[in-house]
Amino acid sequence: MNAFQPSRPPLEPIQKRRVAPRPRRHLRQRSYQVMALETTVKIGVNAVISVAAASALVQLLPYHWLQQDKLREIGTEVKLMEGRVNTLNTKFSHNFDPRENKTIMQQQSYRFDPSQRQVVIMNKDGSEVEQPPDR
């Protein structure tokens, strides 16, 4: 059952088909032309995209510089306002400090604490010297 069986030669000889040889030079030359055309198209498309990007940058750069100038100007104004706010905040905290009641009252009016004496500077001729306000 498992014995080898003699191989038989085929009854009809197998005929090989004859295929006409293709001209390989022509195919290679054609593929080179297609590759050259494809590469040229790619370079052209990339050039168009590059020109579009460059023109967009040329149009956007002046706008960007203008915005940067405005931003610097606003930053300067913010610094000035921060200084003013700090000054006003200091004055506000000084004016509403309960421990400073008497000194604020003396600065803003001519009333003095009864325990204090008012000093008036006089000239030799007896006239009073005008003093600038403390503010």
Image (spheres, grey):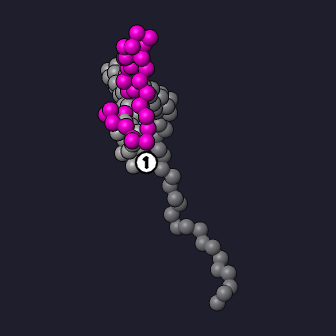
Look at the picture and state if 79 lies above or below 114: above
Given the image, on which type of amino acid does mark 1 rest?
Answer: Arg
Residue displayed at 37% across by 33% down: 107
Placement of 50 over or under 13, stated as above or below: above
User: What's the residue at 37%, 17% (across, down)?
Assistant: 128
Pinpoint residue 130: horizontal percent, then vertical percent.
Answer: 37, 17
- Magenta region: which residues? 107-135
Q: Is residue 108 left or right of residue 6?
A: left
Image quadrant assignment for residue 31: top left
Front residue (pair 113, 83)? 113
Mark 1 secondary-structure assignment:
helix
Q: Is residue 43 magenta?
A: no
The answer to which quarter of the image holds residue 35 is top left
Q: Residue 124 falls in which quadrant of the image?
A: top left
User: Residue 29, percent across and down?
Assistant: 47, 27
The answer to whether residue 10 is seen in the rendering is: yes
Q: Nearer the viewer, residue 130 or 90?
A: 130
Give the x, y percent position of residue 73. Answer: 37, 24
Instruction: Give the position of the N terminus as an image quadrant.
Output: bottom right
- Which residue is at the far right? 3
Q: Is residue 11 above or below residue 131?
A: below
Q: Which residue is mark 1?
A: 99
The furthest residue to the top: 125
Q: Residue furthest bottom?
A: 1
Q: Residue at x 65, y 80 (%)?
A: 5
Assess whether residue 125 is covered by the magenta stretch. Answer: yes
55 left or right of 1?
left
Residue 53 is situated, as x and y percent measured from the top left of the image, at 37, 26
Label 1 Cα crowd, 10 Å radius (few <14 / some 14-19 / many 20+): few
Disc tally is 1
Q: Main secondary structure of the magenta part?
A: loop
* Residue sitting at x 66%, y 87%: 2
